[in-house]
Amino acid sequence: MTDTRGPQPQYEGYATGPLPGEREPAPGQSGPYHPPQAYPSPAGGTQGGRPHGTQGGAQGVGAAQAARRPRTGARTTPRTRKARLRVAKADPWSVMKVSFLLSIALGICTVVASAVLWMVMDAMGVFSTVGGTISEATGSNEGNGFDLQSFLSLPRVLIFTSVIAVIDVVLATALATLGSFIYNLSAGFVGGIELTLAEDE
């Protein structure tokens, strides 16, 4: 490409002239030339190229930082975070598993408690005393009457308690599973149970 603008004028004044700091003072001006400043000087003026208000401004900033420092002996009260949640649905399968295990544990506790109670009552002589009274009341010349001690023996008590525990396991598991279905239906209408959880302090 060729330049068709022709010869351009040369600004010799900028190339050969003195710099702004080296210019001669004007006829009515005393002292060296100072170019105009883009920003005004501080209100306190300048002294030796530094503003008078620099020291005072630094002291003011230091005082503000010292005022913003927290006191070492002060205690801040912790804020306890809380969350409000809603149980929208209960899984019937998980409810059935948990209720089955809990009912089994309850059945075992029932059998053990029955055995311990029978041993304590037998050691205290309750069965012999009550059984003697009942046999005397129901006895006759032909027979000795009802034998309570043989009827309430430990094997019979454990068998009866085990049957009750098995029935309890079946009923508790079925009722808990049915309750989860009923809860899901009711939660679809009213939204479920709302819980407010708070963080431990």
Image: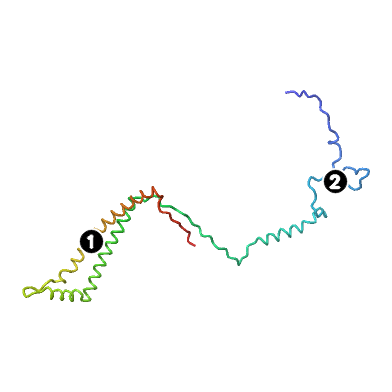
Residues packed near mark 1 inside 10 Å, few (<14), some (14 to 19) or many (20 plus): some
Q: Identify the residue at image location x=20%, y=63%.
A: 160
Q: Identify the residue at image location x=49%, y=57%.
A: 82
Q: Is residue 44 above or below residue 114?
A: above
| Tag 2 and tag 1, C-beta contact below 8 Å | no
Mark nearer the viewer, 2 or 1: 1
Provide the secondary structure element on which disc 1 rests.
helix
Badge 2 amino acid: His
Residue 184: image x %, image y %? 36, 49
Residue 196: image x %, image y %? 45, 56
Query: Is residue 13 rendered to the left or right of residue 74?
Result: right
Of residue 97 and residue 3, the one placed in the foreground of this image is 97
Badge 1 amino acid: Ile
Residue hosting label 1: 164
Provide the secondary structure element on which disc 2 rests.
loop
Q: Identify the residue at image location x=26%, y=67%.
A: 113
Residue 104: image x %, image y %? 28, 59
Residues packed near mark 2 inside 10 Å, few (<14), some (14 to 19) or many (20 plus): few
Farthest residue to the left: give it. Answer: 142
Residue hosting label 2: 34
- Image-quadrant location for residue 17: top right
C-alpha distance separating marks 2 and 1: 109 Å
Farthest residue to the right: give it. Answer: 27
